Image: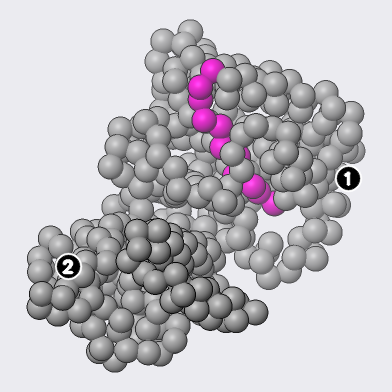
Amino acid sequence: MKEKFSQESVREFADGECIFREGESSLEMYVVQSGAVVVKRGSGQNTVQLAVLGRGEFLGEMSLLESLPRSGTAVARGKTRLLCIQPGGFLLKIRRDPTFAFELLQSLSRRIRETNERLHGSAGEGLVDEAALQQIQKILKKEAA
Amino acid sequence: MITQVSCRKMVVFSDLHLGNPFSQVRRKTVRFIRWAVSQGYDICINGDGFDVAQVSLGRFTQDVPEVLQALKEAVRCGSSVYYVVGNHDIVFEHFLFDWSGFKLAPFLNVRCGGARFRVEHGHLYDPFFVASPRLYDLSTWVGGLLLKVNPALYRMWIRFERLKSRWLNIDGMPGIEGEPASFYCSAAKIEARGFDGVVFGHTHHSGSALLPLGGTYLNPGSWMLSSNFVRIEDGRAELLDFGSFEAAGGQQLVG
Protein backbone atom coordinates (compact mmCIF):
# COMPACT_ATOMS: atom_id res chain seq x y z
CA MET A 1 0.00 0.00 0.00
CA LYS A 2 2.73 2.43 1.02
CA GLU A 3 4.46 2.31 -2.35
CA LYS A 4 1.29 3.27 -4.15
CA PHE A 5 1.05 6.52 -2.21
CA SER A 6 4.72 7.48 -2.12
CA GLN A 7 4.48 10.18 -4.83
CA GLU A 8 3.55 12.73 -2.19
CA SER A 9 4.85 13.35 1.30
CA VAL A 10 3.25 14.57 4.48
CA ARG A 11 4.94 17.24 6.60
CA GLU A 12 4.03 18.23 10.14
CA PHE A 13 4.44 21.71 11.59
CA ALA A 14 4.14 22.96 15.16
CA ASP A 15 2.10 26.04 16.09
CA GLY A 16 3.81 29.18 14.77
CA GLU A 17 6.34 27.26 12.68
CA CYS A 18 7.16 28.80 9.32
CA ILE A 19 6.23 26.72 6.25
CA PHE A 20 7.81 29.10 3.74
CA ARG A 21 8.90 32.74 3.67
CA GLU A 22 8.15 35.57 1.25
CA GLY A 23 10.85 35.80 -1.42
CA GLU A 24 12.09 32.26 -0.79
CA SER A 25 12.73 30.00 -3.77
CA SER A 26 10.94 26.74 -3.11
CA LEU A 27 8.65 25.04 -5.59
CA GLU A 28 6.40 22.61 -3.76
CA MET A 29 2.72 23.26 -3.09
CA TYR A 30 0.68 22.05 -0.14
CA VAL A 31 -2.80 20.88 0.76
CA VAL A 32 -3.91 21.36 4.37
CA GLN A 33 -4.61 17.89 5.73
CA SER A 34 -5.30 19.04 9.29
CA GLY A 35 -4.85 22.24 11.28
CA ALA A 36 -4.66 25.68 9.65
CA VAL A 37 -2.18 27.98 7.90
CA VAL A 38 -1.93 31.77 8.11
CA VAL A 39 -0.65 33.47 4.94
CA LYS A 40 0.76 36.98 5.28
CA ARG A 41 2.74 39.49 3.29
CA GLY A 42 5.20 42.19 4.23
CA SER A 43 7.22 42.52 7.42
CA GLY A 44 7.13 44.33 10.76
CA GLN A 45 4.38 46.95 10.98
CA ASN A 46 3.57 46.55 7.30
CA THR A 47 2.54 42.91 7.68
CA VAL A 48 -0.86 42.16 6.12
CA GLN A 49 -2.68 38.91 6.79
CA LEU A 50 -3.93 37.62 3.43
CA ALA A 51 -5.77 34.46 4.41
CA VAL A 52 -6.28 31.70 6.95
CA LEU A 53 -6.45 28.36 5.17
CA GLY A 54 -8.24 25.36 6.63
CA ARG A 55 -8.56 21.65 5.79
CA GLY A 56 -8.52 20.84 2.10
CA GLU A 57 -7.28 24.27 1.02
CA PHE A 58 -4.23 24.84 -1.17
CA LEU A 59 -1.15 26.97 -0.66
CA GLY A 60 2.10 27.54 -2.52
CA GLU A 61 0.60 26.67 -5.91
CA MET A 62 1.74 29.95 -7.52
CA SER A 63 5.41 29.11 -6.99
CA LEU A 64 4.90 25.60 -8.30
CA LEU A 65 3.07 26.75 -11.43
CA GLU A 66 5.25 29.76 -12.27
CA SER A 67 8.63 28.88 -10.70
CA LEU A 68 8.73 32.29 -9.02
CA PRO A 69 9.77 33.12 -5.44
CA ARG A 70 7.12 32.87 -2.73
CA SER A 71 4.77 35.86 -2.78
CA GLY A 72 3.89 35.54 0.90
CA THR A 73 4.87 33.90 4.18
CA ALA A 74 2.97 30.88 5.47
CA VAL A 75 2.87 30.00 9.16
CA ALA A 76 1.18 27.04 10.86
CA ARG A 77 -1.65 27.84 13.25
CA GLY A 78 -1.84 25.01 15.79
CA LYS A 79 -0.40 21.58 15.03
CA THR A 80 -0.68 21.36 11.26
CA ARG A 81 -0.20 18.52 8.79
CA LEU A 82 0.31 19.29 5.11
CA LEU A 83 0.31 17.11 2.04
CA CYS A 84 3.35 18.21 0.04
CA ILE A 85 3.26 18.00 -3.76
CA GLN A 86 6.53 18.38 -5.66
CA PRO A 87 6.64 19.82 -9.20
CA GLY A 88 7.69 16.42 -10.57
CA GLY A 89 4.69 14.67 -9.07
CA PHE A 90 2.20 17.39 -10.00
CA LEU A 91 1.02 15.94 -13.34
CA LEU A 92 0.88 12.47 -11.88
CA LYS A 93 -1.26 13.85 -9.06
CA ILE A 94 -3.68 15.36 -11.60
CA ARG A 95 -3.75 12.11 -13.55
CA ARG A 96 -4.46 9.98 -10.49
CA ASP A 97 -6.69 12.46 -8.65
CA PRO A 98 -8.37 14.54 -11.41
CA THR A 99 -10.70 16.45 -9.10
CA PHE A 100 -7.56 17.88 -7.47
CA ALA A 101 -7.00 19.92 -10.69
CA PHE A 102 -10.64 20.98 -10.71
CA GLU A 103 -10.46 22.19 -7.11
CA LEU A 104 -7.18 23.98 -7.78
CA LEU A 105 -8.79 25.87 -10.71
CA GLN A 106 -11.77 26.72 -8.52
CA SER A 107 -9.44 28.04 -5.85
CA LEU A 108 -7.48 30.21 -8.32
CA SER A 109 -10.71 31.50 -9.87
CA ARG A 110 -12.08 32.42 -6.45
CA ARG A 111 -8.88 34.31 -5.58
CA ILE A 112 -9.02 36.32 -8.84
CA ARG A 113 -12.66 37.19 -8.18
CA GLU A 114 -11.92 38.23 -4.60
CA THR A 115 -9.00 40.39 -5.76
CA ASN A 116 -11.23 42.06 -8.38
CA GLU A 117 -13.90 42.70 -5.77
CA ARG A 118 -11.35 44.19 -3.37
CA LEU A 119 -9.97 46.38 -6.15
CA HIS A 120 -13.41 47.70 -7.06
CA GLY A 121 -14.25 48.12 -3.37
CA SER A 122 -11.08 50.17 -2.88
CA ALA A 123 -11.94 52.32 -5.93
CA GLY A 124 -15.44 52.91 -4.56
CA GLU A 125 -14.00 54.08 -1.25
CA GLY A 126 -11.60 56.39 -3.05
CA LEU A 127 -8.58 54.37 -1.88
CA VAL A 128 -7.51 53.72 -5.47
CA ASP A 129 -7.39 56.51 -8.02
CA GLU A 130 -9.98 56.03 -10.84
CA ALA A 131 -7.31 56.56 -13.50
CA ALA A 132 -5.07 53.93 -11.87
CA LEU A 133 -7.99 51.50 -11.76
CA GLN A 134 -8.70 52.02 -15.46
CA GLN A 135 -5.03 51.40 -16.18
CA ILE A 136 -5.14 48.12 -14.20
CA GLN A 137 -8.32 47.07 -16.04
CA LYS A 138 -6.62 47.76 -19.36
CA ILE A 139 -3.66 45.58 -18.38
CA LEU A 140 -5.97 42.79 -17.20
CA LYS A 141 -7.93 42.92 -20.49
CA LYS A 142 -4.71 42.83 -22.51
CA GLU A 143 -3.48 39.82 -20.51
CA ALA A 144 -6.82 38.03 -20.91
CA ALA A 145 -6.69 38.59 -24.69
CA MET B 1 -20.51 25.08 -10.46
CA ILE B 2 -21.48 23.86 -7.00
CA THR B 3 -19.01 21.53 -5.34
CA GLN B 4 -18.86 22.79 -1.74
CA VAL B 5 -21.97 22.19 0.35
CA SER B 6 -22.82 22.12 4.03
CA CYS B 7 -25.59 20.08 5.53
CA ARG B 8 -26.98 18.93 8.85
CA LYS B 9 -27.78 15.49 7.47
CA MET B 10 -27.81 13.92 4.05
CA VAL B 11 -28.58 10.61 2.37
CA VAL B 12 -26.59 9.47 -0.66
CA PHE B 13 -27.63 6.73 -3.05
CA SER B 14 -26.61 5.97 -6.59
CA ASP B 15 -26.87 3.95 -9.77
CA LEU B 16 -30.65 3.76 -10.03
CA HIS B 17 -30.30 3.52 -13.83
CA LEU B 18 -33.89 4.62 -14.37
CA GLY B 19 -34.66 3.88 -18.00
CA ASN B 20 -32.46 0.79 -18.13
CA PRO B 21 -34.44 -2.40 -18.94
CA PHE B 22 -32.93 -4.05 -15.84
CA SER B 23 -33.93 -1.23 -13.50
CA GLN B 24 -37.11 -1.78 -11.51
CA VAL B 25 -36.46 0.67 -8.72
CA ARG B 26 -39.03 3.40 -9.42
CA ARG B 27 -41.43 2.65 -6.54
CA LYS B 28 -38.67 1.94 -4.02
CA THR B 29 -36.93 5.18 -5.03
CA VAL B 30 -40.07 7.26 -4.60
CA ARG B 31 -40.71 5.70 -1.16
CA PHE B 32 -37.10 6.40 -0.16
CA ILE B 33 -37.23 10.03 -1.30
CA ARG B 34 -40.47 10.63 0.61
CA TRP B 35 -39.02 8.98 3.73
CA ALA B 36 -35.83 11.09 3.48
CA VAL B 37 -37.86 14.28 3.14
CA SER B 38 -40.06 13.33 6.12
CA GLN B 39 -36.89 12.91 8.23
CA GLY B 40 -35.43 16.24 7.09
CA TYR B 41 -32.53 14.81 5.06
CA ASP B 42 -30.91 16.48 2.10
CA ILE B 43 -30.75 14.06 -0.82
CA CYS B 44 -27.88 13.27 -3.15
CA ILE B 45 -28.11 10.97 -6.16
CA ASN B 46 -24.49 10.05 -6.73
CA GLY B 47 -24.53 9.51 -10.49
CA ASP B 48 -26.26 7.25 -12.98
CA GLY B 49 -29.67 8.02 -11.52
CA PHE B 50 -30.97 8.12 -15.07
CA ASP B 51 -29.62 5.84 -17.75
CA VAL B 52 -29.23 7.27 -21.22
CA ALA B 53 -26.39 4.96 -22.30
CA GLN B 54 -28.49 1.77 -22.11
CA VAL B 55 -31.93 3.31 -22.38
CA SER B 56 -35.20 1.56 -23.11
CA LEU B 57 -37.51 4.41 -24.11
CA GLY B 58 -40.61 2.63 -22.81
CA ARG B 59 -39.01 2.05 -19.42
CA PHE B 60 -37.62 5.59 -19.35
CA THR B 61 -40.98 7.28 -19.95
CA GLN B 62 -42.57 4.99 -17.39
CA ASP B 63 -40.05 5.51 -14.58
CA VAL B 64 -38.48 8.94 -14.88
CA PRO B 65 -41.47 11.33 -14.50
CA GLU B 66 -42.58 9.82 -11.18
CA VAL B 67 -39.10 9.99 -9.66
CA LEU B 68 -38.52 13.53 -10.97
CA GLN B 69 -41.86 14.51 -9.47
CA ALA B 70 -40.84 13.07 -6.08
CA LEU B 71 -37.52 14.94 -6.23
CA LYS B 72 -39.25 18.21 -7.14
CA GLU B 73 -41.63 17.65 -4.23
CA ALA B 74 -38.57 17.17 -1.98
CA VAL B 75 -37.21 20.55 -3.13
CA ARG B 76 -40.59 22.18 -2.47
CA CYS B 77 -40.58 20.68 1.05
CA GLY B 78 -37.23 22.30 1.80
CA SER B 79 -34.76 19.47 1.23
CA SER B 80 -31.74 20.26 -0.88
CA VAL B 81 -31.47 17.79 -3.74
CA TYR B 82 -28.07 17.25 -5.38
CA TYR B 83 -27.35 15.29 -8.50
CA VAL B 84 -23.75 14.22 -9.13
CA VAL B 85 -23.26 13.39 -12.79
CA GLY B 86 -22.14 9.87 -13.64
CA ASN B 87 -21.10 8.21 -16.90
CA HIS B 88 -24.54 6.91 -17.98
CA ASP B 89 -26.20 10.31 -17.71
CA ILE B 90 -23.58 12.80 -18.96
CA VAL B 91 -25.65 13.65 -22.06
CA PHE B 92 -28.68 14.19 -19.84
CA GLU B 93 -27.12 16.87 -17.63
CA HIS B 94 -28.40 19.89 -19.59
CA PHE B 95 -31.95 18.57 -19.35
CA LEU B 96 -31.54 18.04 -15.60
CA PHE B 97 -29.96 21.46 -15.16
CA ASP B 98 -32.81 23.22 -16.99
CA TRP B 99 -35.80 21.22 -15.83
CA SER B 100 -35.19 19.38 -12.61
CA GLY B 101 -34.85 22.17 -10.05
CA PHE B 102 -32.08 20.39 -8.20
CA LYS B 103 -28.38 21.17 -7.99
CA LEU B 104 -26.07 19.49 -10.47
CA ALA B 105 -22.42 18.89 -9.61
CA PRO B 106 -19.41 16.96 -10.95
CA PHE B 107 -18.69 15.94 -7.32
CA LEU B 108 -19.52 17.28 -3.89
CA ASN B 109 -17.37 18.21 -0.92
CA VAL B 110 -19.84 17.93 1.92
CA ARG B 111 -19.25 19.61 5.28
CA CYS B 112 -21.23 18.04 8.09
CA GLY B 113 -20.70 18.26 11.84
CA GLY B 114 -17.14 19.54 11.45
CA ALA B 115 -16.16 16.72 9.10
CA ARG B 116 -15.57 16.73 5.35
CA PHE B 117 -16.82 14.10 2.94
CA ARG B 118 -16.22 13.68 -0.76
CA VAL B 119 -19.22 12.39 -2.75
CA GLU B 120 -18.31 11.47 -6.30
CA HIS B 121 -19.60 8.98 -8.85
CA GLY B 122 -16.13 7.52 -9.33
CA HIS B 123 -16.09 6.57 -13.03
CA LEU B 124 -12.85 8.57 -13.41
CA TYR B 125 -11.11 5.88 -11.35
CA ASP B 126 -12.38 2.98 -13.43
CA PRO B 127 -9.26 1.76 -15.29
CA PHE B 128 -11.34 0.39 -18.18
CA PHE B 129 -13.33 3.64 -18.61
CA VAL B 130 -10.18 5.80 -18.54
CA ALA B 131 -7.79 3.65 -20.55
CA SER B 132 -10.14 2.47 -23.32
CA PRO B 133 -13.09 4.88 -23.61
CA ARG B 134 -14.23 3.66 -27.04
CA LEU B 135 -14.08 0.03 -26.02
CA TYR B 136 -15.93 0.94 -22.82
CA ASP B 137 -18.68 2.65 -24.84
CA LEU B 138 -18.91 -0.37 -27.13
CA SER B 139 -19.14 -2.80 -24.24
CA THR B 140 -21.79 -0.61 -22.58
CA TRP B 141 -23.81 -0.74 -25.81
CA VAL B 142 -23.38 -4.53 -26.13
CA GLY B 143 -24.26 -4.89 -22.44
CA GLY B 144 -27.45 -2.89 -23.10
CA LEU B 145 -28.43 -5.32 -25.87
CA LEU B 146 -27.80 -8.32 -23.63
CA LEU B 147 -29.93 -6.77 -20.88
CA LYS B 148 -32.80 -6.46 -23.36
CA VAL B 149 -32.43 -10.19 -24.15
CA ASN B 150 -32.24 -11.28 -20.53
CA PRO B 151 -31.88 -8.85 -17.59
CA ALA B 152 -30.79 -11.72 -15.29
CA LEU B 153 -27.43 -11.77 -17.08
CA TYR B 154 -26.54 -8.67 -15.10
CA ARG B 155 -26.63 -10.49 -11.76
CA MET B 156 -24.33 -13.15 -13.21
CA TRP B 157 -21.88 -10.42 -14.27
CA ILE B 158 -21.85 -8.90 -10.78
CA ARG B 159 -21.20 -12.35 -9.22
CA PHE B 160 -18.39 -12.89 -11.71
CA GLU B 161 -16.80 -9.55 -10.73
CA ARG B 162 -16.90 -10.48 -7.04
CA LEU B 163 -15.30 -13.87 -7.70
CA LYS B 164 -12.68 -12.25 -9.92
CA SER B 165 -11.74 -9.70 -7.25
CA ARG B 166 -11.39 -12.53 -4.70
CA TRP B 167 -9.08 -14.46 -7.01
CA LEU B 168 -6.99 -11.43 -7.90
CA ASN B 169 -6.70 -10.08 -4.36
CA ILE B 170 -4.32 -12.71 -3.03
CA ASP B 171 -2.42 -10.05 -1.03
CA GLY B 172 -5.55 -9.11 0.90
CA MET B 173 -5.55 -5.46 -0.26
CA PRO B 174 -8.20 -3.42 1.55
CA GLY B 175 -11.18 -2.29 -0.48
CA ILE B 176 -14.69 -3.30 -1.44
CA GLU B 177 -15.21 -6.78 -2.84
CA GLY B 178 -15.85 -6.76 -6.58
CA GLU B 179 -14.12 -3.46 -7.24
CA PRO B 180 -10.75 -2.99 -8.95
CA ALA B 181 -8.09 -1.83 -6.45
CA SER B 182 -7.91 1.56 -8.24
CA PHE B 183 -11.10 2.71 -6.49
CA TYR B 184 -9.71 2.19 -3.00
CA CYS B 185 -6.37 3.78 -4.00
CA SER B 186 -8.18 6.83 -5.42
CA ALA B 187 -10.31 7.14 -2.29
CA ALA B 188 -7.08 7.09 -0.25
CA LYS B 189 -5.60 9.86 -2.41
CA ILE B 190 -8.70 11.99 -1.85
CA GLU B 191 -8.66 11.25 1.89
CA ALA B 192 -5.07 12.57 2.05
CA ARG B 193 -6.37 15.99 0.93
CA GLY B 194 -8.20 16.47 4.22
CA PHE B 195 -11.36 14.38 3.96
CA ASP B 196 -12.92 12.18 6.64
CA GLY B 197 -14.75 9.97 4.21
CA VAL B 198 -15.15 9.24 0.52
CA VAL B 199 -18.35 8.01 -1.13
CA PHE B 200 -18.23 6.56 -4.64
CA GLY B 201 -20.83 4.84 -6.79
CA HIS B 202 -20.31 3.46 -10.30
CA THR B 203 -19.06 -0.05 -9.50
CA HIS B 204 -22.46 -1.32 -8.22
CA HIS B 205 -20.59 -3.13 -5.44
CA SER B 206 -21.86 -2.07 -2.06
CA GLY B 207 -19.55 -1.99 0.95
CA SER B 208 -17.22 0.02 3.11
CA ALA B 209 -13.54 -0.04 4.00
CA LEU B 210 -11.22 1.79 6.35
CA LEU B 211 -8.85 4.23 4.64
CA PRO B 212 -5.11 4.63 5.54
CA LEU B 213 -5.59 7.81 7.63
CA GLY B 214 -8.62 6.50 9.51
CA GLY B 215 -11.37 7.80 7.22
CA THR B 216 -14.05 5.62 5.65
CA TYR B 217 -14.53 4.64 2.05
CA LEU B 218 -18.14 3.76 1.21
CA ASN B 219 -20.08 2.68 -1.82
CA PRO B 220 -23.85 2.23 -1.55
CA GLY B 221 -23.81 0.06 -4.68
CA SER B 222 -26.63 0.02 -7.19
CA TRP B 223 -30.27 0.20 -6.25
CA MET B 224 -30.89 -2.31 -9.02
CA LEU B 225 -29.26 -4.92 -6.73
CA SER B 226 -29.91 -3.68 -3.19
CA SER B 227 -31.33 -0.68 -1.40
CA ASN B 228 -28.26 0.51 0.45
CA PHE B 229 -27.57 4.15 1.02
CA VAL B 230 -25.01 6.26 2.85
CA ARG B 231 -26.18 8.45 5.68
CA ILE B 232 -24.04 11.49 6.52
CA GLU B 233 -24.96 12.90 9.90
CA ASP B 234 -23.17 14.30 12.99
CA GLY B 235 -19.82 14.22 11.17
CA ARG B 236 -20.13 10.50 10.41
CA ALA B 237 -20.87 8.54 7.26
CA GLU B 238 -22.33 5.04 7.43
CA LEU B 239 -23.81 2.47 5.10
CA LEU B 240 -27.42 1.51 5.79
CA ASP B 241 -30.08 -0.62 4.18
CA PHE B 242 -33.42 0.96 3.36
CA GLY B 243 -34.90 -2.50 2.71
CA SER B 244 -34.22 -3.65 6.29
CA PHE B 245 -35.57 -0.38 7.57
CA GLU B 246 -38.81 -0.84 5.64
CA ALA B 247 -39.09 -4.47 6.72
CA ALA B 248 -38.75 -3.37 10.36
CA GLY B 249 -41.78 -1.17 9.87
CA GLY B 250 -39.81 2.05 9.75
CA GLN B 251 -38.78 1.82 13.40
CA GLN B 252 -35.03 1.81 12.96
CA LEU B 253 -32.28 1.74 10.42
CA VAL B 254 -30.29 -1.47 10.25
CA GLY B 255 -26.67 -1.14 9.20
Judging depth in this view, the residue of A72 and B28 nearest the camera is A72
- Pair 1/2: label in front: 2
Q: Which residue is mark 2?
A: A76
Horizontal side of residue A105 vs B62, given as left or right: left
Residue B209 in the image, given as x and y percentages of width and height = 40, 48
Judging depth in this view, the residue of B144 and B71 nearest the camera is B71
Q: Which residue is mark 1?
A: B145
Residue beneath the point at 20% across and 70% down: A48
Q: Secondary structure at mark 1?
A: helix
Q: In the rendered structure, which segment of residues is drawn in magenta?
A: B77-88
Q: Give the main secondary structure, helix, strand or loop, of the magenta stretch.
A: loop
| Classed neighbour count for the residue bearing mark 1: other residues with Cα under 10 Å, few (<14), some (14–19), many (≥20) | some
Judging depth in this view, the residue of A23 and B158 nearest the camera is A23
Q: Amino acid at mark 1?
A: Leu
Identify the image quadrant of the C terminus of chain A: bottom right
Residue A21 in the image, given as x and y percentages of width and height = 21, 82
Q: Amino acid at mark 2?
A: Ala
Residue beneath the point at 68% across and 70% down: B131
Residue B13: mark in rendering: none
Residue B200 in the image, given as x and y percentages of width and height = 52, 48
Q: Secondary structure at mark 2?
A: strand
